[in-house]
Image (cartoon, helix red, strand yellow):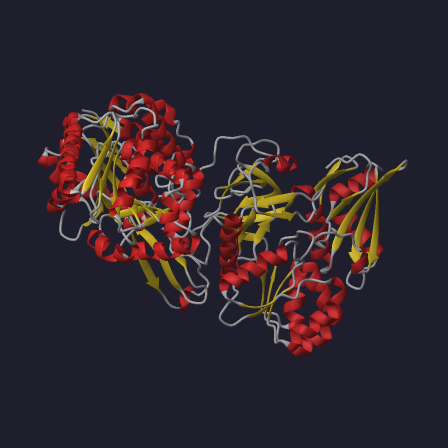
Amino acid sequence: MRHFWQGEWVGDEAVAPRLDTLDDRTQQVITGPRLNPLVVLAAAEKLDLDRHRASLVAWGLDEVEVDETLDALRHALSRTSLESKLKRELGNLDPARMVRFDFRTPTYEAWVPLGLLAHVTAGNAPAAGVLSAVEGLLSGNLNVIKVASDDSGFTAEVLAALASHDQTGQIAARLVVLHFSSSRTDWMSRVLGAADAVAVWGGEEAIAGVTELVKPGARVIDWGPKLSFAYLTRDAWSDVDTLRALVTDVCRLEQQACSSPQVIYLDTEDPSQVFAFAERFASVLEQTGPPTREPSQAEWAEITNTVLVTQLEEHLGFTKVHAGENWRVLADVRFAPRTSPLFRTVWVKPLPRKQITSVLRPMRRYLQTVGLAADRPDTAALARSFVSVGVQRITTPGSMLGGYGGEPHDGVYALQRYSNRVSVQLDDRFAADASLDDLAESRQLPVPPVPVTPKSDFETLQDRPADVYFRSGGSSGAPKLSAYTWADWDEQMWVGAEALLATGLDPRHDRVMNLFFNGHMYASFVSFFSALERMNAVQFPMGGQWGQLDAIAQAVVDNRVDTLLTAPSFVQRLFAEHGAMLKEYGGIRKIFYAGEHFGAQAIARLRDEFGVETIRSAAYATVDAGPVGYQCQASSGKVHHLFTSLHTMEILDPESDRPVPSGEAGRLVFTTHTRRGQRLERYEIGDLGRWVPGDCPCGRQTPRFELLGRTGDVFRAAAQTLNYRRFLTVLEDEHDYSGALQVELNEDAGGEELVVRLESGRAPEPAVTHRTLLSRYPEVAEAVEQDGLLTVRVENVVLADFQRTKSSGKLIAVVDQRGSRSV
């Protein structure tokens, strides 16, 4: 017999000695790197289930059952279904990450694996072993799946294929599939005796047998037999469409599902109505096609015995049998529930609504699904009655075997039963830490094997349904729309809140004014609004308005605002025009910025002249990819930590798609693993950067990188490659310049002109700036003095005269007015 053991196919002789190592293997798994569920989702997307069709045929399924099983698995293992399941059952897509549930207190919670989770599957549910194992993987456990003797190898084959699509090897390390009979008690005892929890698929006898073998304290998770039924009120049972819908539920899967109706209850006490309905229902059931599966000899014996006893009771006036070649309708005027021998065998019974509690409550541990047909007021009242006696699902006839993504199973969430909820409560040393895991591990998820997508092809990535759209600021090209689902937005705003916490915003005490720009589908204002909302921070959502600087300054003072969220150019102009008022107030302690470069001299001025204590990046974020990095309190300038919970980042050579050596500059390329509204796989975002080696003094292990400007900041002029950032650095170093800077490129018959635009009142005289640039920037001097191909002109203008993007108001660093651009 073949078994799949942590990535290897082995025989019985190899399994026997390994069973005694399960404790050690469990410790290796649970103390090693945790399995991010996104790895499982990525592997499941690559499964080709049709390759395993032959194994289902060998199991004994006919073509219809094979198709239904594969379709059910495709749906359950789809990215959408698994994401929905994770979010609904465990709250987010990485539930084992130790994170705050309240940004005001350093208290952390997570869902962690139980350890060794054994799965004992049943022969009549071919998909159960795969699905239960995937749930065990999503919850991070080491999974030992003991498949039924009837299993043809399907479970092991699918799970081995799943593991083969994971280049990290973590899935394979968490899977053991054993194919042996339950009568082999020595193996059963060793597997179940090592388990921290056992999921059992089967009847009462199987559950009892497992319970005897588990160690004390182990969790037995029983997915035992259930009873489902339909319930019809008077208006509904006369409707032929309702009857046809119920026939669909009875015939689908030949009543093999737990949610298949075994009984049809009528809201009546009148026996004549029960018999009349049974006859009508039989006439509809008779019109169905042949069954997709024939009962075994033992199953036929049970059907025959049930029908025979029911026919004998006809003489007592209790029952009436309607039967055809492949179906049976058994009318019974007694209220008590009866299990069906299945295979299109259904009971019809009375159950007046006033008797629901007394009749059904004794069966509460077995009740699962009700197919309820009633008018709207009755539906509401009856639904409450059924759930109060233990019913776990209520739906409509025709939908009893259906479901929706993330739906509870047997009244519980499987992933919660396969996990433990844990908490860690700490002190103010962790006031700025949103996640404990960032202090303990540094991992990026692998990138998919696809080519790099340049920024120019961004619009080709919008091929998925989305809910909300944002427009880029247009500072590096024509504005484009970025697409998000609301799930994307919610996840990214939590990450935005984590960024603000790390950078020093204290939601317990800070009074924050949001001065980012809004409207025109621009994202910055609403992004930070949403992040602050999740932090439960005090917020004054004023918005950045160039013509309302006096009102903004007054609002800061009147409302005792001490923290500003804003763009650098906006806050500099606010202090330039209303510095006296703000200096007298003296209450602004923190400024968090985004969207533009904030020069060192400008930062020093706000600290020295106005007493601002903290000026730091609020986040490195783009409209394309959302929040990408955060700046801890030990970082400065353009150094950020990467949000590994959302992204994998590559830094590639400027001229090729090869990684650059550590510490060298290159193009930033992102794969966003949780994005639904838009596919971002190896997307070149348009920024330059380098990895920052070494450990960060803040203690976080997440990778650090330094931003080195936009790829658009590098431009060609007069046969020279020039960099906007170099102009800025020269002026900061030589003249302590802290104002705005803009480069404009023009051309005419005489050649190319480079205009350097600086802020009046803060910049040196144009002639001084001109001499500095020619003396400190050799490439500029060569183009002007040696080659004669370039003219440099310096302008000092008021801030309002700088060119800005229409949507966001951000300063455009390089304005290329040439007819034929070479950037």
Residue at left 61%, top 70%?
612
Residue 115 against residue 456 in the figure, above or below: below
Query: In this orientation, which residue lies closer to the viewer: 343 or 354?
Result: 354
Residue 402 against residue 87 in the figure, above or below: above
Q: Is residue 36 left or right of residue 355?
A: right
Residue at left 24%, top 44%?
226
Q: Position of residue 554 (x, y in %)?
A: 70, 74
List the single residue furthest toward the right.
749
Residue at left 21%, top 49%?
335
Query: In this orientation, which residue lies closer to the viewer: 352 or 38?
Result: 352
Q: Picture quarter containing residue 9?
A: top left
Query: In this orientation, which residue lies closer to the viewer: 800 or 326?
Result: 326
- Quarter placement of the C terminus: top right
Q: Picture quarter containing residue 201?
A: top left
- Quarter placement of the N terminus: top left
Q: Picture quarter containing residue 171?
A: top left
* Count of labels in the image: 0
Q: Is residue 40 left or right of residue 254?
A: right
Q: Position of residue 51 (x, y in %)?
A: 36, 23
Residue 26 against residue 555 in the figure, above or below: above
Q: Position of residue 27 (x, y in %)?
A: 23, 45
Can residue 261 be seen?
Answer: no
Can residue 73 be seen?
Answer: yes
Q: Position of residue 415 (x, y in %)?
A: 32, 47
